[in-house]
């Protein structure tokens, strides 16, 4: 119902029953009365007039629709009186009330949707609890775009549970099919309203990515979700690393740091649990980090380079830089690589220097050359034996 507008009916003011339910019940009741009046009118016309059942039905329907083609009309006094009382006084009045209540219901529904108080019927959806303090709209847009580019998630519904956007979601989010419910994650009724139990994934964001006290709110929400046995569906953001173990004790599926500029990390943690750990390592120097080595690459394929670095305990090759300064990720494994640099995932506390990389590749070249010579010798040795045979 629109703001500052009086309800159509007194029962709409009852706060203990949702107005939408009241309107629907009233419409159903009026519709049943309308059907009863129409049935009575049809039976009367069919009985007292010289018309078939179908002609009686046709005349009654054209009368209630106020069309009045004039092809059939009651000629008896009983038929005319019943038409006046049942159709014009009763049925048409009821039809007007039904249309009026339907319009009222549409206004009510629109108002509830805008203010985040409409309860959607959802299943296998994503529930995101809380809104980032800064750049929330951009974050949600990028999150939705990224996750719907993942196979199997192209049309997944996304529901926001937040106290933000009291006047309605921005058009940028609505256009992406995102909806919201005005509430908090620590409220059991709000969790019920967003159908958290039937959600495919639940994401709990840190309210303020720079405030350690945000972990208190996040933990409270996570605890409530754990009580509902929803921990294995939940991914949470943790500002302070020391609190990670507390979330794990609740049975939370994944715990990551708040990285607002890269919602892709959150997307990865949702669709591929565990991959967020690899991505987080790339953003710091605590355990592993990608390192660039400038060296000439000209006679090894990608499989050889990856194998050489792994066999020598150096790290994992992620990409190479070609002579046009383009970073080539995941190149074909059998083609010879020509470039001037490598990006390698290495240990942060023991980063190999350039000479170690060169030595490892050189040793692998010699190994491969020796192996090829052995293969050629074996082939030559086998040839005379085959000829004699």
Image (tube, rainbow, N blue to C red):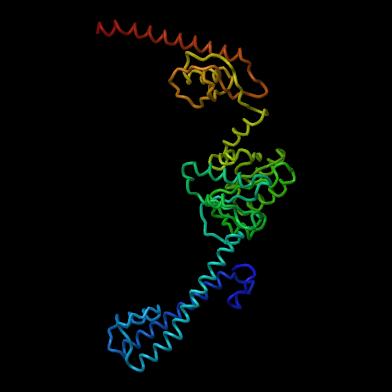
* In this picture, residue 45 sits left or right of residue 259: left
Q: Residue 223: horizontal and vertical position, in percent?
A: 67, 51
**In front of the other: 337 or 305:** 337
Q: Quadrant of the N terminus?
A: bottom right
Residue in view at x 66 percent, y 39 percent: 257
- Please identify the quarter of the rendering in which residue 215 is found: top right
Residue 54 coordinates in the image, percent (x, y): 29, 80
Judged left or right of residue 84, residue 201 is right
Q: Quadrant of the C terminus?
A: top left
Q: Quadrant of residue 196?
A: bottom right
Q: Camera-side residue: 241 or 138?
A: 138
With respect to residue 195, does 84 lie above or below?
A: below
When the figure is inspected, residue 143 is found, relative to residue 8, above or below; the finding is: above
Q: Position of residue 184 (x, y in %)?
A: 66, 55
Furthest residue toward bottom? 77
Position above or below: 266 against 28: above
Residue at point 54% right, 16% down? Answer: 340
Q: Residue at x 39, y 10 (%)?
A: 375
Q: Residue 360: image x %, image y %? A: 56, 14
Front in this rendered view, residue 130 or 225:
130
Label tally: 0
């Amino acid at each position: 119902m629109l703001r500052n507008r009086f309800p159509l009916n007194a029962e709409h003011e009852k706060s203990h029953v949702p107005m939408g339910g009241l309107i629907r019940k009233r419409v159903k009741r009026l519709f049943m009365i309308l059907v009863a009046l129409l049935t009575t009118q049809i039976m009367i016309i069919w009985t007292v007039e010289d018309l078939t059942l179908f002609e009686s039905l046709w005349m009654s329907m054209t009368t209630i629709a106020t069309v009045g083609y004039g092809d059939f009309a009651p000629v008896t006094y009983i038929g005319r009186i019943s038409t006046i009382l049942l159709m014009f006084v009763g049925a048409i009045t009821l039809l007007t009330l039904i249309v009026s209540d339907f319009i009222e219901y549409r206004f009510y529904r629109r108002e509830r949707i805008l203010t985040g108080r409409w309860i959607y019927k959802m299943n296998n959806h994503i529930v995101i609890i809380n809104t980032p303090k800064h750049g929330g709209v951009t974050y949600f847009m990028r999150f939705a775009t990224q996750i719907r580019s993942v196979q199997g998630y192209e049309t997944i519904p996304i529901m926001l549970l937040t106290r933000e956007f009291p006047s309605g979601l921005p058009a940028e989010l609505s256009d992406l099919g995102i909806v919201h419910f005005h509430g908090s994650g620590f409220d059991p009724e709000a969790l019920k309203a967003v159908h958290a139990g039937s959600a495919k994934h639940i994401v709990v964001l840190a309210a303020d990515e720079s405030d350690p006290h945000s972990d208190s709110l996040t933990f409270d929400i996570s605890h409530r979700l754990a009580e509902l046995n929803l921990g294995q569906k939940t991914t949470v953001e943790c500002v302070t690393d020391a609190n990670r173990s507390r979330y794990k004790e609740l049975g939370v599926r994944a715990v990551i740091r708040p990285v607002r500029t890269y919602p892709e990390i959150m997307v990865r943690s949702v669709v591929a649990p565990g991959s967020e750990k690899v991505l987080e390592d790339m953003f710091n120097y605590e355990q592993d980090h990608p390192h660039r080595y400038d060296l000439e690459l000209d006679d090894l394929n990608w499989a050889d380079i990856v194998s050489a670095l792994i066999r020598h305990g150096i790290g994992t090759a992620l990409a190479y830089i070609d002579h046009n300064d383009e970073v080539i990720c995941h190149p074909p494994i059998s083609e010879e690589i020509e470039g001037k640099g490598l990006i390698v995932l290495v240990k942060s506390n023991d980063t190999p220097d350039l000479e170690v990389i060169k030595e490892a590749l050189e040793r692998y070249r010699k190994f491969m050359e020796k192996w090829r010579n052995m293969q050629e010798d074996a082939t030559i040795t086998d040839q005379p034996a085959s000829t004699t045979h």
